[in-house]
Image (cartoon, rainbow, N blue to C red):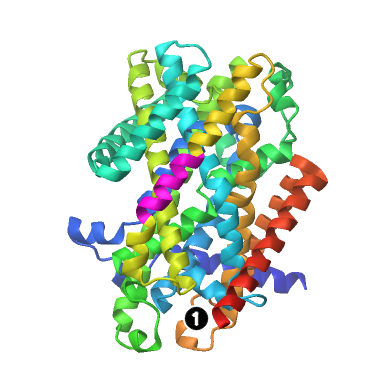
């Protein structure tokens, strides 16, 4: 039995290496044009996670748990890459978005897409409000206005993003953002070298998880000290690398790139028109795009974990409450004070890009959901959902920020509702349970493919996909239990029942 497990594990690792290192004949790249064709939607994933995942929570994780947290981050990136790669292969090989294939799952037709829709309604405004409020807290710190103005700054940021999403002037801002964030990472990386961390300890933290316990000085932060370690770790699992909705959006954007069968809607007649060479080239582009994206995510995480552990932990400091971005300025200003201003500009633009990118996810998923349920054609769905979804998300986010501001106004000294408190339940589904459900659903669809030419998850990959799905589901359920015990699980179960009921009612209405 042990010998069989060793052989099976070695075979899976060998397959991972083989997939991460494409065949030599597909690695011949000449010129910038071919590089640009191979890198596409992965930039969205990287930009969505840099603002909150790396700037905020990687720093926080490094200050609280040190280098051993790198193992967790590495596993997060591996399994989330596996999710994005398998669903991307599905889109390229079959021309079918995962939401469409999930309509064939056992049970009421469309129950899983309906559950994702129900969770998206409250979760998306919470995420957008969190990003806007985080930018507002940084602007509030820079200007020096009272704490309550954090929410006013957040509302102003939301209005600005809403304007940019309608008038399309974000492209220039994105170019500036990439340059400044790249410079910030460069200077922070230099700082890592200057502070001379323990490189062997970093390597050990990447390959061995260690023990995750809060440091003794955390008693100075009651908000964190009262928070179970599992909840804190599950928050990282959900945020680092993006959420399940980001990956559904990624697959939707593959349609725009036209890789393989992704450029046409899924019909048996269309599949025969796409040459096998075109599909292989699309899969190769997917490899480059997804691997580069998650390598960037892990690199950012590593740098900020190291800086958080070496710089902040020694001073018994950690980003918390509404102050999630200001402490990171010490990473670059310790050796070069003039870089503090550059960090603030980069942090604002990074979070601003994350906020704008989150707005782009909603219309893309709504479009694919309309196609999956046969409500609209592709052209109709794109025109229908763009403005309505963005306006609805902005309105919901303004409501969330207004409620937070009202709570702060009524009880400024005993605030009961905070950023992380309201973010945690949303994050537990979007970034943890949603990923597990997507992995297991993808595995089921691949296992029941009738045409062997459309198999996008090979048998040697299935154990890793199943393991990732089970781990994400278990972490999500454990996180819900620790966050709210029976109340959280009852709400979760009720949402699943409502999703199944809505799907069944919709199927009944369509049949009549």
* Residue 506 within the magenta-colored segment of the rendering: no
Is residue 461 at least partly visible in the picture? no
Where in the figure is residue 417, as x and y percent of width and height? 65, 28
The residue sitting at 61% across, 20% down in the picture is 408
Q: Is residue 31 left or right of residue 282?
A: left
Could you say whether the residue bearing mark 1 is in a helix, strand or loop? Answer: loop
Rendered image quadrant of residue 176: top left
Rendered image quadrant of residue 126: top right
Q: Residues within 10 Å of mark 1 (few under 14, many from 20)?
A: some
The residue sitting at 39% across, 30% down in the picture is 157
Residue highlighted by disc 1: 455
Question: Which residue is situated farthest in the right direction here?
Answer: 486
Q: Give the extent of the magenta segment.
A: 386-396
Quadrant location of the C terminus in the rendered image: bottom right
Where in the figure is residue 219, as x and y percent of width and height? 74, 19
Front in this rendered view, residue 236 or 407: 407
Q: Is residue 106 left or right of residue 451?
A: right
Where in the figure is residue 77, as x and y percent of width and height? 53, 51
Front in this rendered view, residue 462 or 405: 405
The residue sitting at 68% across, 20% down in the picture is 221
* Residue 393 within the magenta-colored segment of the rendering: yes
Is residue 504 at least partly visible in the picture? yes
């Amino acid at each position: 039995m042990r010998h069989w497990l060793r052989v099976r594990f070695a075979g899976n690792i060998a397959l991972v290496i083989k997939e991460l290192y494409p065949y030599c004949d597909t690695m011949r790249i000449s010129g910038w044009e071919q590089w640009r064709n191979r890198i596409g939607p992965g930039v969205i994933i990287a930009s969505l996670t840099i603002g909150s995942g790396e700037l905020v929570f990687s720093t926080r994780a490094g200050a609280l748990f040190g280098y051993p947290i790198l193992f967790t981050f590495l596993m997060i990136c591996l399994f989330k890459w596996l999710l994005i790669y398998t669903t991307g292969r599905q889109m390229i090989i079959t021309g079918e978005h995962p939401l469409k294939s999930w309509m064939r799952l056992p049970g009421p037709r469309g129950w899983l897409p309906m559950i994702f829709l129900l969770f998206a309604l409250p979760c998306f405004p919470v995420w957008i409000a969190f990003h806007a409020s985080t930018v507002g807290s940084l602007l509030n710190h820079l200007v020096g206005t009272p704490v309550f103005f954090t929410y006013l700054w957040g509302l102003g940021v939301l209005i600005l993003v809403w304007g940019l999403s309608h008038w399309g002037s974000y492209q220039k801002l994105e170019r500036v953002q990439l340059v400044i964030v790249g410079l910030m990472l460069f200077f922070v990386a230099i700082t890592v070298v200057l502070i001379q961390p323990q490189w062997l300890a970093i390597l050990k933290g990447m390959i061995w998880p260690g023990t995750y316990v809060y440091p003794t000085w955390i008693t100075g932060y009651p908000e964190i000290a009262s928070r179970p370690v599992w909840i804190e770790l599950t928050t990282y699992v959900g945020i680092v690398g993006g959420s399940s909705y980001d990956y559904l959006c990624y697959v939707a954007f593959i349609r725009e790139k036209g890789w393989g069968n992704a450029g046409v809607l899924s019909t048996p007649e269309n599949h025969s028109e796409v040459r096998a060479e075109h599909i292989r080239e699309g899969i190769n582009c997917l490899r480059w795009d997804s691997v580069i994206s998650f390598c960037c995510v892990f690199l950012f995480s590593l740098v900020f974990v190291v800086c958080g552990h070496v710089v902040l932990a020694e001073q018994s400091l950690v980003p918390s409450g509404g102050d999630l971005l200001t402490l990171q300025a010490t990473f670059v200003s310790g050796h070069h004070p003039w870089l503090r201003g550059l960090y603030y500009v980069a942090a604002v633009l990074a979070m601003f890009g994350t906020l704008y990118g989150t707005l782009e996810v909603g219309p893309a998923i709504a479009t694919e959901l309309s196609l999956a349920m046969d409500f609209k054609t592709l052209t109709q769905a794109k025109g229908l959902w763009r403005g309505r979804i963005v306006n609805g998300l902005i309105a919901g986010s303004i409501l969330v920020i207004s409620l937070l501001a009202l709570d702060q106004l009524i009880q400024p000294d005993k605030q009961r509702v905070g950023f992380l408190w309201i973010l945690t339940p949303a994050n537990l589904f979007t970034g943890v349970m949603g990923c597990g459900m997507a992995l297991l659903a993808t595995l089921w669809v691949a296992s029941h493919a009738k045409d062997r030419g459309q198999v996008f998850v090979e048998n040697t990959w299935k154990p890793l996909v199943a393991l990732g799905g089970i781990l994400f589901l278990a972490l999500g359920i454990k996180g819900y239990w620790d966050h709210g015990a029976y109340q959280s699980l009852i709400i979760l179960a009720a949402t699943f029942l409502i999703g199944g009921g809505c799907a069944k009612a919709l199927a009944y209405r369509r049949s009549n």
